[in-house]
Image (spheres, rainbow, N blue to C red):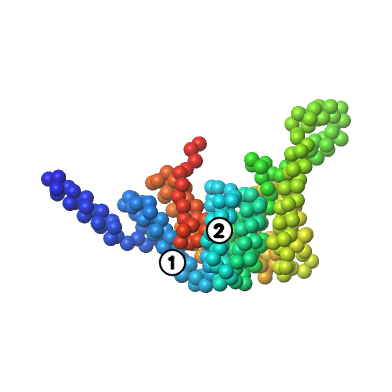
Amino acid sequence: MADEENNEVEQDEKKIEEKSYDLSLVADQVAMFRDKLEEDDIKDKITSHIKKIVEDYDLDKYCVILLFDEYKSIAGYHSDRIYRAISDLDKKKDILMFVESGGGQIEPAYLISKTCKRLSKKKFSVAIARRAKSAATLVSLGASEIHMGLLSELGPIDPQFGGFPALGLANAVEKIAQMTERFPSASDMFSKYLTDNVNIRDLGYFERINESATQYAIRLLNGKQLPEGKTCEGLADHFTNHYKDHSFVIDSDEATELLGSKIIKVGTSEYQAANEIYEFLNFVDFLFGIFKQKNIRYVGSVDTGFDAFEKDKK
């Protein structure tokens, strides 16, 4: 009896191993997890499907890389992974990066963009299905082309410290100064509040970080063919200082107005591929959360960039 049960289990496992999955179908995406495939097998199938999407849209003319991370801010990890993916390219192909990121540190973002520009054959392009915010916007400003759609977002380049915007401290001090003018009898109270809560060194440091973001943007925009009346300096200042909300949506229409149609490309095959990849990975991330208690990111090359990691415990 035990032998029969073992044989049935072995036969079921063999059927699963031989089963093919069409990951363009949601049902097969779910089945892949319900069949309890080994995680390495799931990763291989995901990688193969991303490759198929790239081929279906005739984008294998590019060196395709991904900066898809909805959970971790851009940091040295991301610049290292991307550099590893393209370091041997030596200008043999143009680079296309699919971006999905809420932002992060401006220094690695600048290095990612500059490195992609330097190592691509002629053109570094970015395709944004949904979000390339803050530091990810800085990455995008270095691209020759930014491919967008109706739901694509750039955002203000707004360095954050613990969720607090670099310019926020200066704005708060200015607001208190205005209130002091309106209510001079409360000036002693305002003065005590500032003394107890504001470190003047932090104020200067935050200002310098924001100025650095502007300088990085100028360097990445330098040499581009911009719309009449637009300059690198003016655009850099606009992206870092004009908007008052970190989450402000700069959609494809506004991006085209700012950067021009030579840079902003709407509804292209690059965008369509980015959108399909986003929708696929977004659902796969949901499935990893349900079946594996993990989240996913895809940073670096199509072959090696996929990663699943334990969900943060809250």
Q: Which part of the image, by quadrant, shows the N terminus?
A: top left
Kind of residue indicated by mark 1: Lys
For disc 2, the neighbor class at 10 Å (few under 14, some 14 to 19, many from 20) is many
The location of residue 260, given as percent across then percent down, is 70, 67
282 in relation to 90, above or below: above
Spatial separation of the CA atoms under disc 1 and disc 2: 21 Å
The residue that disc 2 covers is: 82
Q: Is residue 168 left or right of residue 310?
A: right
Q: How many marks?
A: 2
138 in relation to 125, above or below: above
What residue do we see at 74% from left, 39% from top?
202
The location of residue 188, given as percent across then percent down, is 84, 27
Kindly indicate the quadrant of the structure image that contains residue 215. Answer: bottom right
What residue do we see at 51% from left, 70% from top?
59
User: Who is closer to the viewer here, 286 or 159?
Assistant: 159
Q: Residue furthest left?
A: 1
User: Tag 1, which secondary structure?
Assistant: helix
Kind of residue indicated by mark 2: Ile
The residue that disc 1 covers is: 52
Q: Are marks 1 and 2 in contact (CB under 8 Å)?
A: no
Q: Is residue 249 visible?
A: no
Mark 1 vs mark 2: in front: 2
The location of residue 174, given as percent across then percent down, is 80, 40
Give the mark nearest the N terminus, 1 or 2.
1
Which mark, by number, is residue 233? none
The location of residue 253, given as percent across then percent down, is 66, 62
User: Tag 2, which secondary structure?
Assistant: helix
Q: Is residue 139 left or right of residue 182?
A: left
